[in-house]
Image (tube, rainbow, N blue to C red):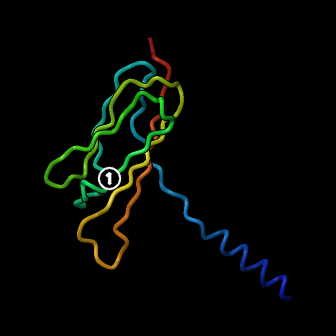
Amino acid sequence: MKRLFIFAITCFTASCTVTPKVESLPDAEFHQPYSIRVNFSDGHRTYPNFFHANITPDDSGLSVSPVTGKWDNEIVISGTPKVNQEISIKISYLVDKIIFQDNRKTKFYRIKVKEQSN
């Protein structure tokens, strides 16, 4: 009985893992300029000093630049894709004036890179 209980608890906790939501951005073309402006904080004001972006693969040819303004909640993803594969972007930031919730947020984006169409 004890083994069955441990097995049930293990299965329950394994099923509770959270899979992050990945948002797809417009496709890019291999070796063609790409630029898009993204509001990443769902309209909330963010702390500009607590913003971090990570692009995978590192040599993708794209970069992320924060747009400073009233809410500090927009970025520009731009550059020329140098890899012919999917590019992943992880944005970590802090939201201002959230009470009774964790103000640390993370967003995930995906850009598919396609062969240049003739």
Give neighbour class at mark 1: few <14, some 14-19, many 20+ (Cα, 10 Å): some
Q: Position of residue 111 (x, y in %)?
A: 45, 36
Q: Position of residue 29 (x, y in %)?
A: 43, 23
Against 100, residue 107 (above or below) is above
The N terminus is located in which quarter? Answer: bottom right
Q: Residue furthest top?
A: 118
> Image check: 96 left or right of 7?
left
Q: Residue furthest front?
A: 49
Q: How many marks?
A: 1
Q: Residue visible at 72% across and 73% down? A: 11
Q: Nearer the viewer, residue 44 or 26?
A: 44
Q: Nearer the viewer, residue 66 or 115?
A: 66
Q: Residue furthest left?
A: 70
- Quick one: SS at disc 1? loop
Q: Position of residue 91 (x, y in %)?
A: 39, 50
Against 114, residue 10 (above or below) is below
Q: Position of residue 108 (x, y in %)?
A: 44, 49
Q: Residue visible at 22% across and 60% down? A: 45
Q: Residue visible at 25% across and 61% down? A: 44
Q: Nearer the viewer, residue 107 or 114?
A: 107
> Image check: 34 left or right of 113?
left
- Residue indicated by mark 1: 51
Against 31, residue 6 (above or below) is below
> Image check: 3 left or right of 103?
right
**Would you identify the image quadrant in which residue 49 lies?**
bottom left
The C terminus is located in which quarter? Answer: top left
**Would you identify the image quadrant in which residue 30 lies?**
top left
Q: Residue visible at 35% across and 27% down? A: 79
Q: Amino acid at mark 1?
A: Phe
> Image check: 112 left or right of 68?
right
